[in-house]
Amino acid sequence: MATIAYPLAWTAALALCFALFSAMARYGVGDALDTITVNGKTCSNGICVDQFDHWQTVPMTWKCRDLRDDCTLRAVRGLCQTDSLYTHPHCPVACGVCHNRTREIPFETSAPFSSHPRNRQGLVEVAGSRFGVPQLIPERGSDDRQGVLDRMQDAHEYWEDVVMEEDRYQPVRTLCRNEYELCALWAARGECTNNERFMKKSCPVVCYTCETLHVDALCPFDPNIPNAWQRGDLNRMFKRIVHDPTLAHYQTTVLSRPDYEPNDTVETASYQIGPWVVIIDDFLNETETSTLIALGADQGYERSTDVGEILEDGSYEDDESETRTSTNAWCYNECDDHEVTQIIWERMTFLTQIPPENSESLQMLRYEPGQFYAVHHDYIENDWNRAVGSRILTVFLYLNDVEEGGATNFPELELAVQPKRGRALLWPSVLDQYPHKKDDRTEHEAQVVTKGIKYGANAWFHQRDYQGSTQNGC
Ligand SMILES: *[C@@H]1O[C@H](CO)[C@@H](O)[C@H](O)[C@H]1NC(C)=O
Ligand SMILES: *[C@@H]1O[C@H](CO)[C@@H](O)[C@H](O)[C@H]1NC(C)=O
Ligand SMILES: *[C@@H]1O[C@H](CO)[C@@H](O)[C@H](O)[C@H]1NC(C)=O
């Protein structure tokens, strides 16, 4: 760096000299200075000689300021109320909580620092400014001092050797920052585990959790993990469902398929030409349908959400929307472990030949009169190059006969499927020749239920290992 081009650096260097001088003066020249080396930078009494340009700009004491660019937007969207744990500390100005900042931090903040920065013997780790707010180091004699210094050293190594080295961290290099000057102290005191959620968001460097800030870092796409479908596999699966002798006992009806069977013509065919849409009327028996309904009730039906906007961390917002008014319950734990659920998974696996770990858990649905799910597509944009892969296939299970309404309607195909107890409805979300690409024709809606209640269950199969990815927090 050509120093002459950076007048600020000169001023900063002077300030640093002054600070060093005062620190030395306090102990007297010749005193055994408490000197450590952090990744090649010399730190005396906690002052590390590095990155002069940050010295002046660093807030030495807390200033109430918003830490994110989108704070106003977040406040307008109501996140100060709905996600106060994250939003208050990150957007205190926009949320108007500057006056009682201490209440926003969910744990003990008292630290052995004197209040005026110039009198402080606990000093500032300047080098830490590359990954966020420089960290306060407790004064000499404090019990916390060594723990914090060790933590800073480890954080440096983590930053240099992991975050800056490994490709998967590329998406988080600009996101991963310690946002409080006390992060290292909190981490040294065990807050990374005691207040995991807050610390992962606000002090990710000293907690070594940078990868959790973006799904692409947390769940890197591993090209060695195979896709469920290659070109042509979609067609092969549906043809097998329709023709294979081992599946001939099912009462299967083709409503739509890409081409005519040999000898069929437009006049004779009982199906239309288009993407595959198939129903199997006796896929579940009555014990199974009533068991699933009961299991869903045990889990507790809650207002359904849509896949909303993409968030900064690459995940999707849950959108409680006007276009989806049903309630649902995810079939986890006891619901998923139930023997009937397991038998149904085995059956779906045998039917589709897609590994069950590629599917999301069953989503149990309940529609009351007046409820519906407006036209939408199950395909999720961007998932195709993520660890979970695209949603490729939907298996919809109808769990009861609905008195009136509640059909699954495909407007592009002019095809409506009535609910019927035990019926399975299958359709792809992608194209046979491009199994990562959306097939726009299979957009669909759950039409309004006008009488009675509609129960159903969704299995969404992905191109890749969905369950394994989500276990890793993806
Ligand atoms: C600030 O603190 C007061 C009480 O100390 C509390 O009633 C109020 O809700 C707090 N404000 C916010 C926005 O958290
Ligand atoms: C098509 O029809 C011809 C003549 O009726 C018959 O010989 C042939 O077996 C049929 N093919 C198939 C696949 O049904
Ligand atoms: C329904 O399926 C279950 C397995 O899920 C089986 O144990 C039961 O015997 C079946 N009931 C009837 C009436 O076939």
Image: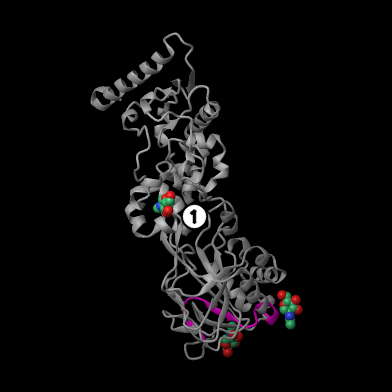
Three-letter code, disc 1: Arg
**Residue 355: quadrant of the picture:** bottom right
Residue holding disc 1: 386
Q: Position of residue 363 (x, y in %)?
A: 57, 69
- Quadrant showing the N terminus: top left
Q: Does residue 155 appear in this view?
A: yes
Please give left or right for residue 34 compared with residue 95 in the image.
Answer: right
Give the number of callouts: 1
- Asked if the stretch drawn in magenta spans residue 399, the answer is no
* Residue lying furthest top: 30
Seen at 31% across and 22% down, the residue is 15
Instruction: Report the span colored magenta.
Output: 271-289
Residue 75 coordinates in the image, percent (x, y): 35, 56
Seen from the viewer's position, the closer of residues 1 and 306 is 306
Residue 412 in the image: above or below residue 359: below
Q: Position of residue 51 (x, y in %)?
A: 36, 27
As helix, strand or loop, the secondary structure at mark 1 comes to loop
User: In this picture, is 435 found above or below 165?
Assistant: below
Q: Nearer the viewer, residue 319 or 440?
A: 319
Q: Quadrant of residue 336?
A: bottom right
Q: Residues within 10 Å of mark 1 (few under 14, many from 20)?
A: some
Q: Is residue 23 above or below residue 167?
A: above
| Residue 2 in view in this figure | no
Residue 276 covered by magenta stretch:
yes
Q: Position of residue 407 (x, y in %)?
A: 50, 83
- Colour pattern: one colour
